[in-house]
Image: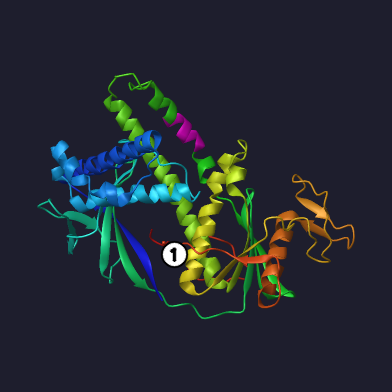
């Protein structure tokens, strides 16, 4: 089974290469913003929708009007146009919001589909004499199809290498997992082979954002006191101290993101390795994030990213991921007798079944019900629907104790 896979490695460009890359980012950002503004005006005035193939023909004319674009890689400019076309398609399909103009101070990237080479630990790209040093933390055995270079807001540079990678499905096992995610505990996982043989475990929520909150507030206050633009019309140039503290704040945000991503990779990989069938709740995360009091905690937990990781890793390894119906009362249904307590409040973390008298932990009970639904996959189950697959230390009882390893981006 062959899948597209992206390796990501850190770049260490020198001053000359940094200046060159920053110019390339600017050229691609200019083309993207130019055609976005053109598309908006054409639609407002003439009701003409964006067309990639028609816009592609204008790039040579654009180079005559703006000679500095001749220094850019022409294929990279075309890729920027393809990205804009994809942004419009996602908007029209209700998968994303309307495309925004790219800003200089946000993360930047440039795609190089051809005419690049990798010699040892150096990456050679068009119109740059010397190779850029790459920190390879693993070997790439596959043929690299295309690359893109990204600069994060922290100032770090990375190269993303797209390859066609062969994946061998794992051996099938007779094990099902039901996962109930939450805020107090990141997840409660119930795993087993049948209704009489299963174990439940709670995975504590690391809350990386909460742990770094004081440091974030301190850096934000220090940053706001430095000299910088206060309004859009303000022409004050940022001071060197402002740039220094801005980089510190960006690095802290990046560190929090990396911590969270590392944790999610470990939990998702272990779950996929130890389960043939994984059952999740179909949560309305976009709607839940609108709650101002809960949105920071929900964003910090990153349920959506966790679900995406489970889906593509299951796809790679020959596992199945299912979602129960959004209105299935997993928390209100007694996992022992099946009766439903309709008036159960969200604040009640434990409840006693009025029919059989068993006291349930709300989250554990929900995960057991999801696990029981997973057992029905081989039979008839109206509650389960296959999840759509995406295209890229835990105390454990009942799970295999293999070493947790971080998966590279």
Please indicate whether residue 285 sits to the left or right of residue 260 in the image: right
Residue 157 seen by the camera: no
Point 62% across, 48% down: residue: 183
Q: Is residue 244 magenta?
A: no
Location of residue 331 in the rendering, given as x and y in whole percent from the top left corner = 74, 56
Which class describes the residues within 10 Å of circle 1: few (<14), some (14-19), or many (20+)? few
What range is drawn magenta here?
213-219
Point 19% across, 61% down: residue: 121
Location of residue 316 in the rendering, given as x and y in whole percent from the top left corner = 46, 71
Residue picked out by circle 1: 405
Point 62% across, 40% down: residue: 294
Comparing 153 with 95, the one in front is 95
Label 1: state its secondary structure: loop
Q: Is residue 218 magenta?
A: yes
Comparing 244 with 126, the one in front is 126
Image quadrant where residue 202 sits? bottom right
Above or below, 165 against 136 in this view is: below
Above or below, 246 against 314 in this view is: above
- Magenta stretch prevailing secondary structure: helix
């Amino acid at each position: 089974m062959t899948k597209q896979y992206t390796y990501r490695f850190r770049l260490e460009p020198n001053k000359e290469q940094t200046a060159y890359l920053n110019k390339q980012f600017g050229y691609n950002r200019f083309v993207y913003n130019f055609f976005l503004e053109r598309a908006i005006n054409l639609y407002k005035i003439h009701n003409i929708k964006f067309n990639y193939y028609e816009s592609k023909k204008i790039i040579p004319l654009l180079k005559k009007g703006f000679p500095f674009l001749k220094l850019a890689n022409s294929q990279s400019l075309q890729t920027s146009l393809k990205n804009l076309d994809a942004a419009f398609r996602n908007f029209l399909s209700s998968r994303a919001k309307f495309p925004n103009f790219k800003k200089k101070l946000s993360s930047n990237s440039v795609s190089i589909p051809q005419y690049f080479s990798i010699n040892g630990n150096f990456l050679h790209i068009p119109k740059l004499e010397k190779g850029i040093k790459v920190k390879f933390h693993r070997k790439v055995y596959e043929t690299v199809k295309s690359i893109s270079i990204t600069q994060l807001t922290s100032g770090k540079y990375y190269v993303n290498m797209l390859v066609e990678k062969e994946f061998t499905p794992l051996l099938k096992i007779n094990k099902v997992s039901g996962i109930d995610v939450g805020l107090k505990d990141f997840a409660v996982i119930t795993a087993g082979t049948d209704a009489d043989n299963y174990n439940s475990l709670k995975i504590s929520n690391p809350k990386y954002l909460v742990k770094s909150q004081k440091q974030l507030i301190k850096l934000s206050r220090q940053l706001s006191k430095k000299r910088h633009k206060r309004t859009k019309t303000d022409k004050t140039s940022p001071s060197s101290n402002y740039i220094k503290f801005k980089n510190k704040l960006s690095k802290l945000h990046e560190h929090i993101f990396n911590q969270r991503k590392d944790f999610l990779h470990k939990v998702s990989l272990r779950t996929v390795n130890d389960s043939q069938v994984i059952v999740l709740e179909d949560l309305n995360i976009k709607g839940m994030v609108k709650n101002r009091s809960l949105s920071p905690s929900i964003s910090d937990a990153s349920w959506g990213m966790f679900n995406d990781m489970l889906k593509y890793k299951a796809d790679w390894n020959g596992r199945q991921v299912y979602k129960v119906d959004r209105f299935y009362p997993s928390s209100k249904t007694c996992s022992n007798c099946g009766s439903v307590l309709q008036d159960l409040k969200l604040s009640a973390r434990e409840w006693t079944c009025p029919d059989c008298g068993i006291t349930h932990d709300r989250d554990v009970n929900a995960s057991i019900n999801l696990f029981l639904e997973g057992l029905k996959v081989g039979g008839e189950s109206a509650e389960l629907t296959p999840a759509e697959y995406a295209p890229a230390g835990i105390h454990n009882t009942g799970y295999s104790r293999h070493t947790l390893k971080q998966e590279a981006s």
